[in-house]
Amino acid sequence: MTITTQTSPLVKAEGITKIFGTGDKEMVALSGLNLEVKEGEFLSLLGPSGCGKSTALNIMGGLLRATEGTITFGGEPMTEPRRQIGMMFQQAVMFPWRTTLENVLLPVEIFGESKKEFKPKAQELLSMVGISEFENSYPWQLSGGMQQRAALARVLLHDPKLLLLDEPFGALDEFTRETMNQELLRLQNYANSTAVLVTHNITEAVFMSDRIAVMSARPGRLVGILEVPFDRPRRPELQTTNDFIKLVAEARSMLELQ
Ligand SMILES: Nc1ncnc2c1ncn2[C@@H]1O[C@H](COP(=O)(O)OP(=O)(O)OP(=O)(O)O)[C@@H](O)[C@H]1O
Ligand SMILES: [Mg+2]
């Protein structure tokens, strides 16, 4: 007798359509998107600018409502932001009048919890992302990369089950971006969380992901899913192997075939 264990997806999006505006200002940003995010995986949403990646991510995070379709998180309808879901955006959202540590503790205040209780954890996370000596500095005293490290610490504070990452290192130079991507993979593994990354960088999508959801230009639809079978941890040298280059070419042709 064979026993098959079926784990239900952490996120399930069915027939998601998002229309912005009304009348002749109406704009279909997403059209009938079906997507499952499996527990523990690293999934990328890859597609051209304006195809609705951020819109899809914001719907998954409960920041936006779909016009049509349903979305569930852990089997329950997504209707509002949850503590179990951490979001990161292209620009680190940091308040200039707060120190790094106070910025990392911001979600604790938003959820009305005790800052004292969370302070040791915030400090541990700042040390994990390599900026503990800056805990009392203000954001303007930090480089862009350091600010994103602080944002990464903040997003991990509540042990999120799901990380939603909207080109979090897009504003950084290529070298810092690669380093931060490595950090992100290390921390995702450490935190045992599931991740969805929005990107329009094909190489980055292949390097980071277990699966890539390739999207079409507006209105955004799912073109197909590409499986990325490489072992983890992944080293930068992987990018020079034939298998890696082949997958990048495959993703590119999926994007171009629309
Ligand atoms: N709040 C909004 N109101 C009106 N239109 C919007 C809104 N948000 C997004 N759009 C439109 O929906 C479409 C998809 O936008 P979205 O930001 O999701 O694209 P994207 O794939 O993330 O693009 P990029 O890669 O440039 O970030 C765009 O045409 C955009 O102008
Ligand atoms: Mg976007």
Image (cartoon, rainbow, N blue to C red):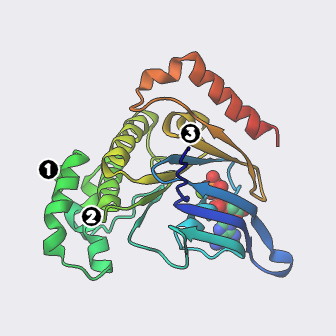
Are the residues flagged by discs 3 and 2 in contact, CB closer than 8 Å? no
Residues 34 and 141: in front is: 34
- Choose mark 1 or mark 3, whichever is in front: 3
Instruction: Kindly state the secondary structure of the residue where label 2 is placed.
Output: helix
Instruction: Kindly state the secondary structure of the residue where label 3 is placed.
Output: helix
Residue 235 to residue 145: above or below: above
Residue on which disc 1 sits: 133
Residue on which disc 3 sits: 205
Residue 144: x and y in percent read 36, 49
Q: CA distance from mark 1 to mark 3?
A: 32 Å
Residue 201: x and y in percent read 59, 39
Mark found first going from the N terminus, 3 or 2? 2
Task: Spot the residue most to the right.
Answer: 24
Judged left or right of residue 38, residue 82 is left
Judged left or right of residue 257, residue 4 is left
Residue 104 - label: 2
Mark found first going from the N terminus, 2 or 1? 2
Instruction: Kindly state the secondary structure of the residue where label 1 is placed.
Output: helix
Judged from the image, the quadrant occupied by ligand 1 is bottom right
Residues 173 and 3: in front is: 3
- Choose mark 2 or mark 1, whichever is in front: 2
Identify the residue at horizontal 50%, vertical 67% (top origin). 74
Q: CA distance from mark 2 to mark 1?
A: 14 Å
Please indicate, yes or no, whether residue 63 appears anywhere in the rendered image: yes
State which quadrant residue 258 falls in. Answer: top right
- Choose mark 3 or mark 2, whichever is in front: 3
State which quadrant residue 257 falls in. Answer: top right
